[in-house]
Amino acid sequence: MLSLGSNLGDRLDNLQEGIDALFDAPGLDFIAISPVYETKPVGGPEQDDFLNVVIVADSSVAPQSLLERVLNIEESMDRVRDLHWGPRTLDIDIVTVDDLTSDQPELVLPHPRAHERAFVLVPWSDVDPDAALPGRGRVADLLPAVAGQELRRRDDLSLQPPA
């Protein structure tokens, strides 16, 4: 499962471009895309709100190869990494890859803060109500802990599944 966010430029177009790029190369099979949510930034400096979405896909590529794809897409979209938790044209987080776990510094699986983020859990539960976060349990059971975080479902915005 992948989580995408954008809070610079045309946020919706950035998300769509990221989704399209993820599936341009072989190895990812699209399953579902969540509704779009608008969220307040978590941590970091003062900045504009994010648009967030999650993508559920089957992957036949190694997690490290998927990470390389994600980083290349972010770079191609002018992602700047000079400020921790700073504003981004596009942020793509690999949240889970099947039930794999990894503690490699460059790729921790599942994502170490996914269980703390409403912008991950809420859209994920929309598209997969039975989803589970390895080591943390069912996503539905994790939702009460993030209930106070500001997010708003944007039914006026939509993204297209990859072609």
Image (cartoon, grey):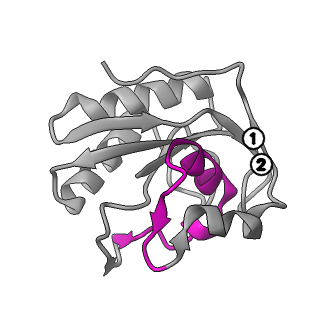
Q: Which residue is mark 2?
A: 40
Where 83 falls versus 108 (above or below)?
Answer: above
Sequence-wise, the earlier of marks 2 and 1 is: 2
Percent across and percent down for residue 138 are 54, 68
- Asked where in the image residue 84 lies, by quadrant, the reply is bottom right
Where 10 falls versus 79 (above or below)?
Answer: above
Which residue is located at x 71 percent, y 19 percent? 156
Q: Which range of residues does the magenta coloring cover?
A: 107-135
Q: Does 134 lie within the magenta span? A: yes
Amino acid beneath label 2:
Lys
Q: CA distance from mark 2 to mark 1?
A: 5 Å
Please identify the quadrant where the C terminus is shown. top left
28 on left or right of 99: left
Amino acid beneath label 1:
Asp
Which residue is located at x 57 percent, y 63 percent? 139
- Residue sitting nearer the eye, 162 or 20: 162
Percent across and percent down for residue 4 are 51, 43
Q: Which residue is mark 1?
A: 49
* Mark 1 crowdedness (10 Å alpha carbons): few <14, some 14-19, many ≥20: some
Residue at the far front: name it: 130
Percent across and percent down for residue 50 are 68, 41
Q: Are marks 2 and 1 in contact (CB under 8 Å)?
A: yes
- Asked where in the image residue 52 lies, by quadrant, the reply is top right
Where 6 falls versus 128 (above or below)?
Answer: above
- Residue sitting nearer the eye, 17 or 1: 1
